[in-house]
């Protein structure tokens, strides 16, 4: 029997990209998936791809409306009964220098990537503790390193790393696993949808040369099933960058300035 069989798995940002492919992969493995995103049409499209023998549902919610997260989860639990695994995937990236990024755009990034994630996690946590379940964060290698064009995005991802590393040691004795999944370049529309992205940046982005989202989903699902605490999913360069930064931060800064990071 597959690890995910009959487990209720809530995935945010499930209408496209990594969330869509995670939903498809976990559904194949027997999970009852709760798809959450803002775009009802795209949620329906993803839902229609799933195997009906493992019942799944779609719910429209904007994770950046973090003040409404508690009510959303309370209403959801009344409907579906429980949540075994929460996968915090919703987020937005950045492709602009700090000096060129408005405070309003920085706040937009933080509201979605950080506060929205914390609100849903806190709302789900009692249920997940009861079930000895899992909290999964689709973080980023930017939760470990620094580059140009990612100031607010890196701030949100570094914050997620710190928060969930702390949460892990608070709940692991209660049977709850916390997994930080850190993607490198994956071939999704993340660059196209990023704050500050331009036509030139999209054309020259290295993102399309990254791992396929279907391959990412398989690796992520395997990591979740093994209840890993942290995993980097990407190419050699991403893993090397995290190691290099940890080993010698000053030399890393010199190195990363010369790299193509859009």
Image (cartoon, grey):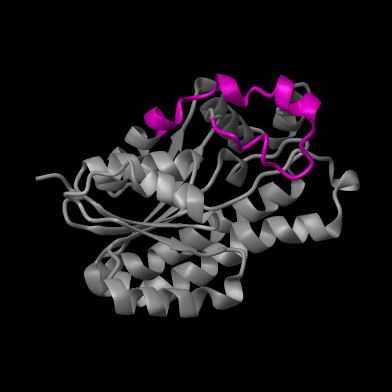
Residue 246, image quadrant = top right
Q: Which residues are magenta?
A: 188-216
Q: Is residue 70 above or below residue 51?
A: below
Q: Give the residue at x 79% y 41%.
A: 196
213 in magenta: yes
Taking 145 as reference, is 128 left or right? left
Q: Position of residue 143 (x, y in %)?
A: 59, 46
Q: Position of residue 81 (x, y in %)?
A: 25, 74
Residue 103, image quadrant = bottom right
Question: Would you say residue 260 is visible in this rendering?
Answer: no
How many dots with numbers?
Answer: 0
Taking 48 as reference, is 191 left or right? right
Q: Is residue 189 above or below residue 157?
A: above
Q: Position of residue 53 (x, y in %)?
A: 16, 49
User: In this view of the protein, which residue sits in the foreground, 245 or 18?
Assistant: 18
117 in magenta: no
User: In this view of the protein, which residue sits in the foreground, 34 or 221?
Assistant: 34
Q: Is residue 176 above or below residue 143?
A: below
């Amino acid at each position: 029997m597959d690890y995910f069989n009959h487990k209720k798995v809530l995935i945010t940002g499930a209408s496209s990209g990594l969330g869509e492919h995670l939903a498809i992969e976990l559904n194949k493995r027997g999970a009852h998936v709760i798809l959450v995103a803002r775009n009802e049409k795209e949620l329906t499209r993803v839902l229609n791809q799933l195997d009906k023998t493992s019942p799944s549902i779609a719910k429209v919610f904007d994770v950046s409306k973090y003040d409404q997260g508690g009510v959303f989860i309370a209403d959801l639990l009344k409907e579906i009964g429980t949540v075994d695994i929460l996968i915090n995937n919703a987020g937005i990236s950045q492709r602009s220098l700090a000096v060129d990024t408005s405070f309003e755009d920085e706040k937009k990034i933080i509201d979605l990537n950080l506060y929205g994630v914390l609100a849903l996690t806190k709302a789900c946590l009692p249920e997940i503790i009861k079930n000895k379940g899992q909290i999964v964060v689709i973080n980023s290698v930017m939760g470990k390193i620094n580059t140009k064009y990612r100031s607010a995005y890196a701030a949100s991802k570094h914050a997620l790393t710190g928060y969930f590393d702390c949460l892990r040691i608070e709940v692991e004795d209660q049977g709850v696993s916390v997994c930080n999944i850190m993607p490198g370049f994956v071939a999704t529309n993340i660059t196209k949808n990023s704050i500050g992205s331009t036509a030139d940046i999209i054309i020259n982005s290295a993102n399309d040369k990254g791992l396929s989202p279907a391959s990412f989903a398989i690796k992520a699902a395997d990591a979740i099933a093994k209840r890993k605490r942290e995993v980097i999913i990407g190419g050699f360069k991403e893993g090397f960058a995290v190691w290099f930064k940890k080993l010698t931060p000053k030399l890393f800064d010199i190195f990363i300035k010369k790299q193509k990071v859009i």
